[in-house]
């Protein structure tokens, strides 16, 4: 077995908004299996799909404790996508600093979204109705404590600004962030409507989260594919379960297969002693 990803501490993978960790329909596609095949001990956050940051952090804390109990390790490395990155940041600032070695965020809206600001200007009853409908559906799918309105609010720039004040990156935990972007509205059909809207309000984006918002501690730059299409918010968690292209990347910020990107991220953490 290749041990390139055999980290000192186990890896806790934390999903984003709208999905759950499922055994037979993995949120992360081929990524966990690839990392495990190269020595990583992988665990999942198992939080609600539309739970509030605070509520989800409590669930992730339980998953983290279980990972430590199973492995006997003293800490975990957290790899988080989208809103999951905010939950990881909340957790590290609320009692779990000593149990977290590193936090890596992928396309996390650290600075909120001007697009969401605009949408939240809709009549309050309309936003509340949409949130309630989402809560009902997500509860059917397995959420214990859905709170869609809280999720919407957490993505506004005003709430994000206060969140960043209350939840800074701790000096004794290594933190880093990555951003991805599409090259246009038709880079990924899933985001052909959202991409131009987010682009209008927030600039370059992955169909959901802007590059500017994803930039946080130790920002590792903007990554895209080795083809013309770029990499979307869904591509980065391997929605299609296949490589983007057979082309060889021409720079360190180009990606031909998303699994290779994650291997490089974990390999770097290993070399740093995490």
Image (cartoon, rainbow, N blue to C red):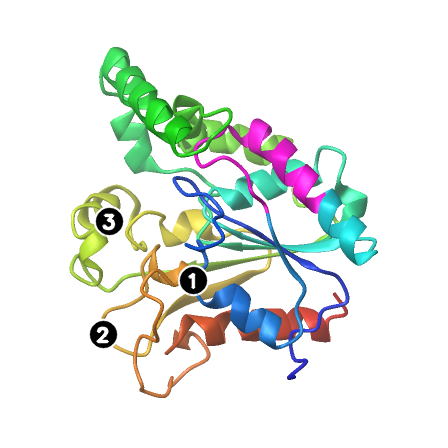
| Mark nearer the viewer, 2 or 3 | 2
* Mark with earlier residue (2, 3): 3
- Other residues around mark 3 within 10 Å, as few (<14) / some (14–19) / many (≥20): some
Residue at the top extreme, as displayed: 125
Residue 199: which disc?
Answer: 3
Question: Is residue 179 placed above or below 129 in the rendered structure?
Answer: below
State if disc 3 and disc 2 touch (CB < 8 Å).
Answer: no
- Other residues around mark 2 within 10 Å, as few (<14) / some (14–19) / many (≥20): few
Which quadrant would residue 266 be assigned to in this image?
bottom right
Task: From the top left corner, tell me how far across and down residue 150 is, in percent.
Answer: 44, 24
Q: Is residue 228 left or right of residue 253?
A: left
Question: Is residue 135 placed above or below 114 in the rendered structure?
Answer: above
Q: Is residue 268 left or right of residue 246?
A: right
How far apart marks 2 and 3 lie (CA) works out to 17 Å
Question: Is residue 125 placed above or below 185 in the rendered structure?
Answer: above
Q: Residue at x 60, y 32 (%)?
A: 165
Q: Nearer the viewer, residue 127 or 37?
A: 37
Task: From the top left corner, tell me how far across and down residue 121 is, in percent.
Answer: 26, 21
State if disc 2 and disc 1 touch (CB < 8 Å).
Answer: no
Task: From the top left corner, tell me how far across and down residue 180 is, in percent.
Answer: 38, 61
Q: Secondary structure at mark 2?
A: loop
Question: Is residue 150 placed above or below 210 in the rendered structure?
Answer: above
Q: Nearer the viewer, residue 20 or 53?
A: 20
Is 52 covered by the magenta stretch?
A: yes
Residue 29: which disc?
Answer: 1
Is 105 covered by the magenta stretch?
A: no
Residue 228: which disc?
Answer: 2
Q: Secondary structure at mark 3?
A: helix
């Amino acid at each position: 077995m290749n041990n390139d990803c055999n980290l000192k501490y186990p890896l806790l993978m934390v999903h984003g908004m709208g999905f759950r960790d499922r055994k037979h329909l993995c949120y992360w596609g081929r990524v966990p299996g690839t990392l495990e095949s190269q020595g990583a001990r992988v665990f999942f956050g198992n939080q609600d799909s539309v739970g509030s940051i605070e509520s989800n952090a409590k669930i992730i804390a339980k998953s983290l404790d279980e990972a430590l109990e199973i492995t006997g390790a003293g800490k975990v490395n957290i790899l988080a996508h989208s809103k999951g990155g905010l939950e990881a940041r909340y957790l590290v600032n609320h009692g779990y600093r000593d149990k977290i070695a590193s936090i890596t965020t992928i396309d996390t809206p650290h600075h909120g979204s001007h697009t969401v600001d605009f949408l939240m200007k809709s009549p309050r009853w309309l936003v509340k109705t949409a949130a309630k409908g989402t809560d009902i559906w997500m509860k059917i799918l397995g959420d214990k404590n859905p709170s869609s309105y809280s999720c919407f609010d957490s993505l506004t720039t005003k709430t994000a600004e206060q969140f960043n004040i209350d939840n800074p990156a701790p000096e004794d935990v290594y933190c880093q962030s990555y951003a991805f972007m599409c090259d246009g509205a038709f880079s990924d059909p899933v985001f052909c409507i959202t991409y131009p809207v987010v682009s209008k309000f927030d600039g370059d984006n992955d169909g959901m989260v802007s590059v500017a918002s994803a930039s946080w501690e130790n920002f590792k730059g903007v990554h895209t594919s080795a083809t013309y299409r770029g990499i979307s918010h869904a591509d980065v968690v391997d929605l299609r379960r296949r490589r983007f292209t057979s082309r060889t990347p021409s720079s360190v910020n180009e990606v031909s297969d998303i699994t290779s990107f994650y291997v490089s991220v974990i390999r770097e953490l290993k070399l740093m002693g995490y």
